[in-house]
């Protein structure tokens, strides 16, 4: 490990993993994206008051640097960019100067509200999820990742910390997950209005996004608790209670008529949804969402010994309320450009990302097992997997290792008045209708459909 002092000689600088700096860099306007350059090496002061990276431009074979410092409320602020340099050593010399200053943290900009500490106890009773996050060594990686994502939020509302600590833990965690997904892909993310939750933009393409979670009517369900397995009956799983929960949640949001807001009118608008209606439901409920949206149930047809997937049109869900299926078939909802979904807005995801970034308590290992989408033509069954999260085999599943957005899915409305450009959210799996079939497009060769992460300590 190379150690050196900052430019003013007051703070010791040490190397950190690039993945750790990428978490810090979620606070930058476009996240950890510096095209055409990429991160060559990363550093942090021992006391954590500053961090930075050296960038390599592979086209010009030159180096530059970016320096960040903590603000008085711990948020990261970019304090310096420098370059170009012929060697990484020369770039590091300037980076150490920019990271230096053993003085006080960076000040708040005039008029900005000081961000409330995430761990400051609130008046409400803490939820079991928040207690697990903050009181167990096994979830220290998640705590660090969640903390950095919270500090990267452009403008969290005044209730964010209180909600995260109490009954709205899942909803707020989903917002942090979405932010990480968007910034990771180089999107500008803003929260300049009370609603919708996010405005995202890249290369002139934009979209407003409102986030929501499907929760149980019983406040004691969801989150931490006894694991609830998928309904044994396949029709119930696809068109019954889980599909109705998605339908009721989406319809409740649509009743708020976001499209009539002046800043949303005439622009792309999407609802992002995650499922927390039962403990563990996010592992098995995803198929119910497109069934409801497109009014199409995925079935398997057998002909002369050959099995193939077919879409069976349905008019109503089979739950107790018999809700009409096919939200995307209704012209009255053409203002809804898409529905964004993920089953990865979980403590397990944040725990893995924090662990991969380098926050690894002694003796801790993580094993992830689940199922991968089989892209073999005609394949109908997923591919099971079980791997150590820190193994080379696991990292090799994706070109850059595990990313935030790999479980993100965008279901496009074929009747959308203002469609979302596919390349606005390039890291997501995009579902769309073509010639009567529902197809998907993704940059990932391996897509995890569902998984469970086991934490082991010695």
Image: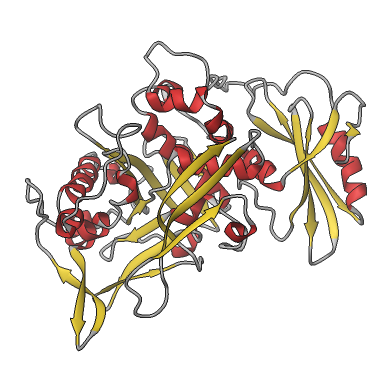
Percent x, y of residue 135: 51, 22
Q: Which residue: 51% across, 24% down? A: 134
Q: Residue furthest bottom?
A: 304
Q: Which residue: 45% across, 44% down? A: 199
Compared across the picture, whether 164 is left or right of 54 comes to left
Q: Which residue: 66% across, 46% down? A: 19
Percent x, y of residue 186: 58, 52
- Picture layout, residue 197 above or below residue 411: above
Percent x, y of residue 363: 63, 36
Query: Which quarter of the rendering shows the N terminus?
Result: top right
Query: Which quarter of the rendering shows the C terminus?
Result: top right
Q: Residue furthest top?
A: 123
Where on the picture, by quarter, is residue 219? top left
Compared across the picture, whether 171 is left or right of 398 comes to left
Q: Nearer the viewer, residue 211 or 46?
A: 46
Q: Which residue: 34% across, 79% down? A: 378
Where on the picture, by quarter, is residue 310? bottom left
Residue 150 visible somewhere in the drawing: no
Residue 170 visible somewhere in the drawing: yes
Q: Nearer the viewer, residue 337 or 57?
A: 57
Q: Residue furthest front?
A: 458
Q: Nearer the viewer, residue 392 or 442?
A: 392
- Picture layout, residue 392 above or below residue 218: below
């Amino acid at each position: 490990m190379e150690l050196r002092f900052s430019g003013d000689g007051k703070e010791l600088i040490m190397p950190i993993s690039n993945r750790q700096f990428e978490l810090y860099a979620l606070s930058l306007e476009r996240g950890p994206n510096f095209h055409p350059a990429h991160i060559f090496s990363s550093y942090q002061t021992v006391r954590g008051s500053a961090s930075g990276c050296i960038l390599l431009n592979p086209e010009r074979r030159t180096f530059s640097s970016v320096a960040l410092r903590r603000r008085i409320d711990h948020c990261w602020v970019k304090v310096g960019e420098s370059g170009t340099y012929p060697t990484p050593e020369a770039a590091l010399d300037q980076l150490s100067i920019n990271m230096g200053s053993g003085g006080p943290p960076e000040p708040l900009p005039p008029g900005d509200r000081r961000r409330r500490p995430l761990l400051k106890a609130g008046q409400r009773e803490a939820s079991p999820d928040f207690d697990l996050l903050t009181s167990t060594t096994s979830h220290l990686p998640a705590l660090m990742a969640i903390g950095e994502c919270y500090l990267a939020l452009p403008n969290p509302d005044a209730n964010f910390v209180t909600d995260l600590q109490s009954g709205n833990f899942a909803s707020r965690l989903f917002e942090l997950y979405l932010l990480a997904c968007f910034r990771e892909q180089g999107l500008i993310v803003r929260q300049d209005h009370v609603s919708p939750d996010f405005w995202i933009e890249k290369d002139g393409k934009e979209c407003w996004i409102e986030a929501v979670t499907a929760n149980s009517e019983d406040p004691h369900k969801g989150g931490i608790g006894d694991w609830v397995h998928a309904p044994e009956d396949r029709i119930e799983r696809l068109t019954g209670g889980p599909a109705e929960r998605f339908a009721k949640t989406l319809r409740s949001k649509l009743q708020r008529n976001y499209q009539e807001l002046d800043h949303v009118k005439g622009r792309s608008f999407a609802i992002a949804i995650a499922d927390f209606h039962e403990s563990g439901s996010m592992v098995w409920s995803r198929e119910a969402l497109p069934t409801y949206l497109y009014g199409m149930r995925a079935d398997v047809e057998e002909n002369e010994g050959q099995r193939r997937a077919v879409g069976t049109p349905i008019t109503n869900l089979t739950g107790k309320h018999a809700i009409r299926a096919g939200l995307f078939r209704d012209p009255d909802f053409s203002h809804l450009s898409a529905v964004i979904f993920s089953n990865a807005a979980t403590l397990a995801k944040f725990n893995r990302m924090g662990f991969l970034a380098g926050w690894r308590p002694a003796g801790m290992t993580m094993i992830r097992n689940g199922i991968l989408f089989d892209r073999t033509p005609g394949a109908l069954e997923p591919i099971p997997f079980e791997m150590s999260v820190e193994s080379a085999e696991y990292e090799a599943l994706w070109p850059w290792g595990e990313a935030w957005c790999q479980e993100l899915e965008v279901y496009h409305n074929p009747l959308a008045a203002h469609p979302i450009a596919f390349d606005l959210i390039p890291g997501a799996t995009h579902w769309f209708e073509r010639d009567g079939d529902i197809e998907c497009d993704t940059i990932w060769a391996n897509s995890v459909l569902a998984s469970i992460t086991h934490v082991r300590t010695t």
